[in-house]
Image (cartoon, rainbow, N blue to C red):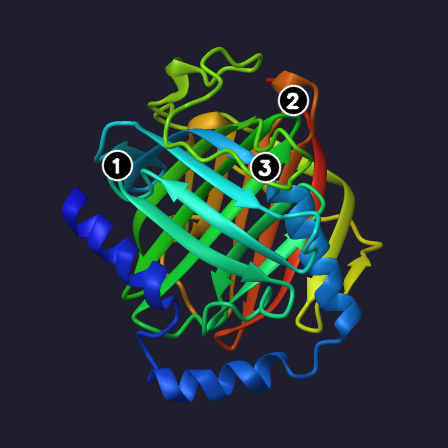
């Protein structure tokens, strides 16, 4: 089961969104999909990516499989992983992602980043960035596979997940629980270069008790106190209306709801259809933060916008 999950992840990491269309066609579609985006909007997304991700992240990743209707089961042991996003001050429009133990212990991966390609780096998918939230997702929901990476940031924490659908069903999930570590000792002129953990005793350590999520998440309806949206023109707008997310109501099996390590929540359709909303959240209240969430909205199988929510809940955890 784990081997299948890793094979699926490798496929999607290398060609997210390529399952339905040929590469040449997707390249043309990618150019068309982003040609209208203004330089200011591109610059804002690049700046938010640097703000959210720009340090060294040391922590754990773990693979899970769905255990319908409202739980997950681990299919791997926790793996120590390090993700490092380097943005040199001397070259503000470029960067590099270094990963150690990404898919298996000891492997190394390097991805070049730039402001020019911040949106369309992977054909068929796009980045989305808000203050405190960042990720990528497939832009079409009608392929054989669909994938998303969602990260939440508060204090020294980076908590998130990678979610994959296969044949429109939830297939596999990877949890991510990271803590920030020093990335440079000379103001980002050079960067730390080691596959080993550099901060053994974190001030905000990863809770070993959360490695196995609870059988059923116990959450109430969360009420939005601040809501903003990112449209496909990549303009961030504040929304007047409040939106509530019920993290418990499965609506008679229409939604798969689960809780992952580091207080990550997800509420996604059991079957991915052309008109769908996928919601992801992270509860930072235990360390004095908010419950922060993001929803990915589709209409006629096309991603139309992302919505960011800052929320309070009816009860304290």
Residue 114 falls left or right of residue 104: right
Q: Kindly identify which residue carries mark 2.
A: 285
Q: Nearer the viewer, residue 224 or 32?
A: 32
Q: Nearer the viewer, residue 152 or 68?
A: 152
Count the marks: 3
Disc 2 vs disc 1: Cβ atoms closer than 8 Å?
no
CA separation, marks 2 and 1?
A: 34 Å
Q: Residue at x 62, y 48 (%)?
A: 87
Q: Residue at x 32, y 34 (%)?
A: 62
Q: Position of residue 77 (x, y in %)?
A: 24, 28
Q: Secondary structure at mark 2?
A: helix
Crowding near pointer 2: few (<14 within 10 Å), some, many (20+)? some
Q: Kindly identify which residue carries mark 1.
A: 106
Picture quarter containing residue 260? top left
Q: Is residue 316 visible?
A: no
What number is the disc on residue 55? 3
Quadrant containing the C terminus in the rendered view: top right
Q: Secondary structure at mark 3?
A: loop
């Amino acid at each position: 089961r784990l081997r299948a999950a890793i094979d699926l992840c490798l496929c999607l990491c290398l060609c997210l969104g390529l399952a339905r269309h040929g590469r040449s066609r997707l390249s043309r579609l990618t150019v068309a999909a982003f040609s209208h985006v203004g330089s200011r909007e591109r610059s804002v997304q690049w700046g938010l990516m640097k703000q959210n991700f720009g340090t060294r992240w040391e922590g754990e990743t773990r693979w899970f499989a769905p255990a319908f209707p409202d739980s997950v089961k681990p299919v791997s042991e926790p793996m120590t992983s390090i993700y490092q996003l380097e943005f040199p001050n001397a070259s503000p429009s470029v960067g590099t992602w270094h990963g150690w133990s990404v898919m298996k212990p000891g492997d190394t991966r390097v991805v070049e980043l730039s402001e020019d390609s911040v949106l369309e780096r992977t054909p068929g998918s796009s980045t989305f960035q808000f203050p405190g939230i960042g990720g990528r997702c497939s832009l079409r929901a009608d392929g054989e596979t669909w994938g998303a990476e969602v990260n939440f940031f508060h204090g020294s924490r980076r908590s998130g997940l990678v979610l994959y659908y296969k044949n429109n069903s939830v297939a596999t999930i990877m949890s991510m629980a990271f803590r920030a570590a020093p990335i440079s000792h000379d103001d980002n002129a050079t960067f730390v270069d080691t596959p080993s953990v550099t901060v053994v005793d974190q001030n905000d350590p990863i809770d070993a008790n959360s490695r196995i999520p609870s059988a059923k998440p116990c959450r109430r309806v969360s009420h939005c106190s601040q809501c903003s949206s990112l449209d496909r023109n990549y303009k961030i707008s504040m929304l007047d209306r409040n939106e509530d997310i019920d993290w418990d109501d499965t609506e008679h099996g229409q939604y798969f709801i689960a809780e992952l390590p580091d207080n990550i929540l997800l509420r996604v359709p059991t079957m991915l259809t052309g008109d769908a909303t996928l919601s992801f959240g992270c509860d930072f209240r235990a360390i004095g933060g908010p419950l922060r969430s993001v929803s990915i909205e589709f209409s006629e199988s096309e991603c139309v916008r992302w919505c960011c929510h800052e929320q309070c809940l009816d009860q304290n955890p």
